[in-house]
Image (cartoon, rainbow, N blue to C red):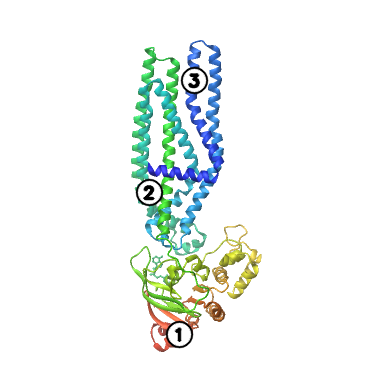
Amino acid sequence: MRVMFSGVGKLLSAAWRIDARKTVVATFLMLALAASAALLAVALGMMTDAVIGGRATDAAVLGAVVALLAILAQSSGQFAMVAYFELSELIELDLHRELLAVSNGSAGIGHHERPEQADELTVLVQDSGQFRSSMESLFQAATMVLAVVLGAAILAWQSPLLLLLPVAAAVPLFTGRLAESALERAKTGVAEPTRVALNLFQATTTARYAGELRVFGVEKELRQRYASLWRTATRGLYGAHLRAMALRAAGQVVFGLAYVGAVLLVVRNAIAGQQSVGEVVLVIVLATQVNQQVTGAVTQLQQLQRLANTYLRLGRLRDAVAGAGSTADQPVPDRLVTGIAFENVSFSYPSTDRPTLRDVDLTLAAGSTVAIVGENGAGKTTLVKLLCGFYQPTAGRILVDGVDLRRLPVERWRERMAAGFQDFVRYEIRALEAVGVGDVTRVSDEVAVHDALVKAHSTDVLRALPDGLSTQLGTSYADGAELSGGQWQKLALGRALMRDNPMLLLLDEPTSALDPQAEHELFERYAEHARRASAQTGAVTVLISHRFSTARMADKIIVVGDGQLLEVGDHDTLMRAGGPYAEMFAIQAKAYS
Ligand SMILES: Nc1ncnc2c1ncn2[C@@H]1O[C@H](COP(=O)(O)OP(=O)(O)OP(=O)(O)O)[C@@H](O)[C@H]1O
């Protein structure tokens, strides 16, 4: 109950914050609706007595009152809907905004990988379609609860025994709540197969994967897996739905018995001459209303409880994502003087206890270019993710000019870095902005975007764009241009080079779609530029590449294997050492010769 009240409180305060006037209008109309239903029953009872007593004028006036109240009962609901319809939409937007903030607003990305938080997010995303009906549920539930209270007061005035009727109405409410809790528990229990099924569904309906799925002929297998996951999820939910149905039915039976008892009571009183026919009509009409209102209230309160659970989940997720709070108390330096150092860094991803990096000690000197090489899964990208502050080391520290990275405000730190990722985003917006977002302050600056594309050796992409930088990208739009993998990657590379003078440039295989010669030339030019720029900012450039012809140009080469540093040095030193680097270099050189 506390959860429900707190959810309702949050919803009301959101409605008030969004539009106080509409909230007041909707509340007033809701009160009118609640009162008109109960008064209609009273007026009907009085009119019946007037008709039976032969009081024509009274009967006519009361008839008009009945008609007016009936119109009010019908139409105030419609007017209230006009008031809360827009509020509902605004509240839905507000909740979506909050959901997006919780999902994307944190410094780290660990909550997407911790199963319990990923599950919370799945349920929230699934329930987000119901956010819009929350305001309607609140007003309808409040209307019905108020109408029941008013009806109860009138029934008690008729006969205190009749008060048992609204009391019995509480039974289906209670069993309805029990049913909803059982469903909620079941939903949480099957969140994991649901999440996996949704991922599969997305993979099988995304144009990007369509070709590969056909070539490998795996659609059938994926469909079977999808069906099996839904079966698991449905089995889990089926039992809970049955229990919920039984609970709700039991509640309704209790109320039904009370209703029959109430009608028999007033009919007996009327036969004994203790009550008028009008009073019998009043009680029968009111009891019918109470029955309908209780049924409606149960449904609406279930909706409200769902909403309250949404707020609860959002709160839990927000707290978990916020974590221990920021530990930043140092400014980000304007330029690097000594560089960046990994001090005994170990790291395990949130979803696993297995360490991905172990005891990494490493210095990235200010002004240097550094290449990281190693086999697939060695831990190269993980080093970059730690430098971005997506995760905190599980043990050890990363020092920026001697200051722990945790003590620097992560947003400011990221403003001073530029990055090109292996898993870059294909922004389906105008080409200009798809590159410009690399520096949001200059997102539509054509000169800056053009310069970035020149730096990235990527101006040839412009030839593939019918309207140049104004071209809409992506097949989601009828007139959108679809690019090749390499062309998308070139735009991503341009994006990575948008920021002027970053202190840290991270290039995680951003050039894998380019041919080795183009990658070599690009990095050569870039390293040259970086060396000059580093005089101003002490910039460190980190490149991950599987191509040794590119990696050899770096001042320092780091060889990673199974989460540990195997070797560190420049090309000549490592070749002389005859270790893993020399071995891998020789294999690749042979393959190309
Ligand atoms: N989000 C994650 N959660 C759990 N484990 C992960 C996650 N990302 C990577 N790993 C694991 O960490 C290890 C290192 O991954 P990483 O991406 O750093 O390798 P890499 O050297 O960059 O490989 P590649 O050359 O294939 O890109 C791998 O075993 C991988 O399975």
Residue situated in front as seen by the camera: 309 or 21: 21
Ligand 1 sits in which quadrant? Answer: bottom left
Check the image and report above or below for 519 versus 155: below
Circles 1 and 2: CB atoms closer than 8 Å:
no
Q: Can residue 561 be seen in this view?
A: no
Residue at 35% in and 33% down: 171
Residue type indicated by callout 3: Leu
Residue situated in front as seen by the camera: 214 or 228: 228
Q: How far apart are marks 1 and 3 (CA)?
A: 96 Å
Q: Position of residue 275 (x, y in %)?
A: 40, 15
Element carrying mark 1: loop
Disc 1: which residue: 570
Residue projecting furthest to the bottom: 576
Element carrying mark 2: helix
Q: Where is residue 317 in the image (x, y as percent from the top left)?
A: 41, 54
Residue type indicated by callout 2: Lys
Residue type indicated by callout 1: Asp
Q: Residues within 10 Å of mark 1 (few under 14, many from 20)?
A: some
Check the image and report above or below for 467 versus 333: above
Residue situated in front as seen by the camera: 224 or 153: 153
Disc 2: which residue: 187
Residue situated in front as seen by the camera: 77 or 517: 77
Check the image and report above or below for 294 versus 333: above
Upstream in the sequence, badge 1 or badge 2?
2
Q: Position of residue 266 (x, y in %)?
A: 38, 18
How many tags in the picture? 3
Check the image and report above or below for 370 versus 171: below
Disc 3: which residue: 44
